Image (cartoon, rainbow, N blue to C red):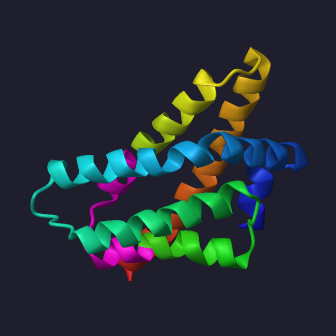
Amino acid sequence: MDKLIRFLDIDPTAQLHAAAIWLLIEHRLDHIIEVFYADVRQSDPALALSDETVQRLKVTQRKHWRSLFENQLDLQYFNSASLVGIRHSQIGLDPKWYIVGYARIKTDFSRVILNADLPLATKTAFLVTLDKYVALDMALAISSYTSLLLD
């Protein structure tokens, strides 16, 4: 993970930006996740997620995003991000659905940033940081996902 963090140039400035992004999205996150799972349930009737499962996933997702943006890029975060890929592999979710689902969430986060009352330069810096953090998070999940598929 450290190599990925260095490669993505997640430096102290990016970490400060990530914390600020969290403050922007935190109060909108429940709504974003709610809409996401409503759309997931409508997109594939075969998935048949129970209300209980959706509620559990919402809580898990909120914790995961908080961990990512509050700069807890530690072993616990690494394990959490990797577990996402493992769980998706275990339920047989095609990685393309993980990727497009992630894109949906990222788009909503981007909209929050773009609609914030911030200078354009700050919005730009936040969007760059969002891309870095999303790339790291997806890389870890997909890496564990594909390693299970290859085993």
Magenta stretch prevailing secondary structure? helix
Q: Is residue 61 above or below residue 125?
A: below
- Give residue 80's position: percent from left, percent from top: 57, 74
Residue lying at the far bottom of the rendered structure: 151
Q: Is residue 101 above or below residue 113?
A: below
Residue 90 is covered by the magenta coloring = yes
Quadrant for the C terminus, please: bottom left
Is residue 2 covered in magenta?
no
Indicate whether 27 appears above or below 147: above
Relative side of 25 to 48, left or right: right
Name the residue nearer the viewer: 145 or 62.
Answer: 62
Comparing 102 with 141, the one in front is: 102
* Residue at (76, 59) in percent of width and height: 71
Taking the image as shown, residue 84 lies to the left or right of residue 41, namely: right
Instruction: Tell me where residue 83 appears, x and y as whole percent.
Output: 49, 76
Residue drawn where x is 35% and y is 68% of the image: 55
Instruction: Using the rendered view, name the quadrant where residue 113 is placed.
Output: top right
From this viewpoint, which residue is outermost toward the top?
A: 120
Image point 36% across, 56% down: which residue? 98
Q: Is residue 7 visible?
A: yes
Q: How many marks?
A: 0
Q: Position of residue 62 (x, y in %)?
A: 53, 61
Residue at (53, 43) in percent of width and height: 28
Q: Which residues are magenta?
A: 86-101
Location of the N terminus (image quadrant): bottom right
Report x, y in % for residue 73: 74, 66
